[in-house]
Image: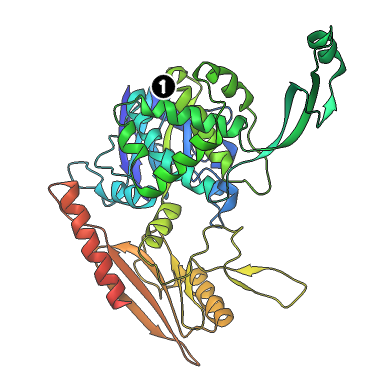
Amino acid sequence: MSQITTTDNHNKQIDSEPDLLNLAKIADVKIKDLKLDDNPNLLIFPRDLSQYGDKISESNIISLQGDIISTGNIMGFVGLGDTQLDIKSRFAQDDGRDYFLHYMLQKVFSINLFDIKHTSNKEQVFDFLLYLFPYYLKKALAQGLFKKYRTFEHNDANLRGVIDVSRHIRQNIPFRGTVAYNTRTHSYDNEITQLIRHTIEYIKTKPSGGVVLNNDLETRQCVSQIVAATPTYKPTLRDKIIGQNLRPVRHPYFGAYTALQNLCIKILRHESIKFGNEKDKVYGILFDGAWLWEEYLATFLKDFTHPHSKTDNSGKKMFCNPHRVLCQPDFFIDGKIVLDAKYKKHETLFDGKQREDRFQLLSYMHIFNASQSGLIVPSNKTGLLEQGEIVNGGTMSLYGLCANHKANSFLDYAKAMKNEENTFLNQI
């Protein structure tokens, strides 16, 4: 196994011809064209690529020119055949410890995470899937318990449905005072909630299961809801339940259950995952840095409105009726300030390269009647990096949040980042 290490938004020369041939198969290929169903061991977060307005699905994992690979905002690890590419954040320490990526993951997924070693080892990847389970469970249950119509079979004297003639003949002749009939009602006890219940029971058997399922009060409440909704749970039916869930959930209201369903199946079928054993399959875990950066900022910018996806109604209409085109900055306080999160190297806001970002902020300011606007970027310094006065009033700023800390442990890094967050809030 050949392992290549690089960072996001970076160029790196590849000397090995076999590695170049392998990486060429995924270079300059949009994430949406990777056909995730054909590469089930490639996990990309966020899972709902179409739900975000930053064109995540249009991103390439890497680009290739000659023997030079170029990375963008994608971080994590990805492999094909005998080549594995480890993409760390550009704020990783000299010894390779990527505390910045780990810190954002811990904050966004609300997990107690201290170190992820980017590796193709199946068990370490599987453990990380367990840590993601509470996050997706809470997102799904925020939409309510999944319910659907189910047909129930009865055989008693309290007829209240459609008589099942063939079953009645089989079971009740000679007549014994009961009638075989079927009822069709909405039920919380269905193949989706059963799949989640099987996953919960399976996680309980793992060494870290207790930590995962008792991470916080909300997680414990969600687990209790699922247990109460699935009284017909039987451990022996796991394979049957998995088979019933191989078709993704397609429901206009319970959209968050699609990602949870996919994760549950991967957890329950982890023994069949063979990372790196299939030469033509892409494997790994990848995170979109732009999405992760924005969601991380949302964990402490509590006073701002933050639309979580393009399907979120938080925002303002750009046009008068009947047109309904929503204008959605990443963060805003209506009538005061609009902010956009940018996970990229921003040397300056006011050179010729940042024209699109400036015009985007100007449009946000106009629609939200805001006197202030700005971009927030990861940086070597926290606070105001640049500011310009706008003709006819208002200010446009570039704000940094320092992520470049030299730390001896993850705990030290987390403390430093917490201080930077407080400093940022005080200045903004």
- Amino acid carrying label 1: it is Gly
User: Is residue 428 placed above or below 140 in the rendered structure?
Assistant: below
Residue 164: image location, x then y, percent: 84, 20
Extreme residue in the right direction? 165
Left or right: residue 256 versus residue 407 is: right
Closer to the camera, 304 or 66? Answer: 304
Q: Which residue is at 65% across, 40% downward? A: 147
> Quarter-wise, where is residue 150 in the image?
top right
Residue 21: image location, x then y, percent: 45, 27
Extreme residue in the left direction? 408
Closer to the camera, 32 or 369? Answer: 369
Left or right: residue 76 versus residue 360 is: left
Residue 370: image location, x then y, percent: 50, 83
Q: Which residue is at 68% across, 48% downward? A: 252
Residue 234: image location, x then y, percent: 52, 21
Residue 61 seen in this snapshot: no
Q: Which residue is at 49% across, 71% downward? A: 355
The image quadrant where one finds the N terminus is top left
Q: Secondary structure at mark 1?
A: loop
Closer to the camera, 398 or 52? Answer: 52
Label tally: 1
Instruction: For label 1, count other residues whose C-alpha is less than 10 Å away and answer few (under 14), some (14-19) or many (20+).
Output: many
Q: Which residue is at 78% across, 73% downward? A: 322
Left or right: residue 349 versus residue 172 is: left
Disc 1: which residue: 276
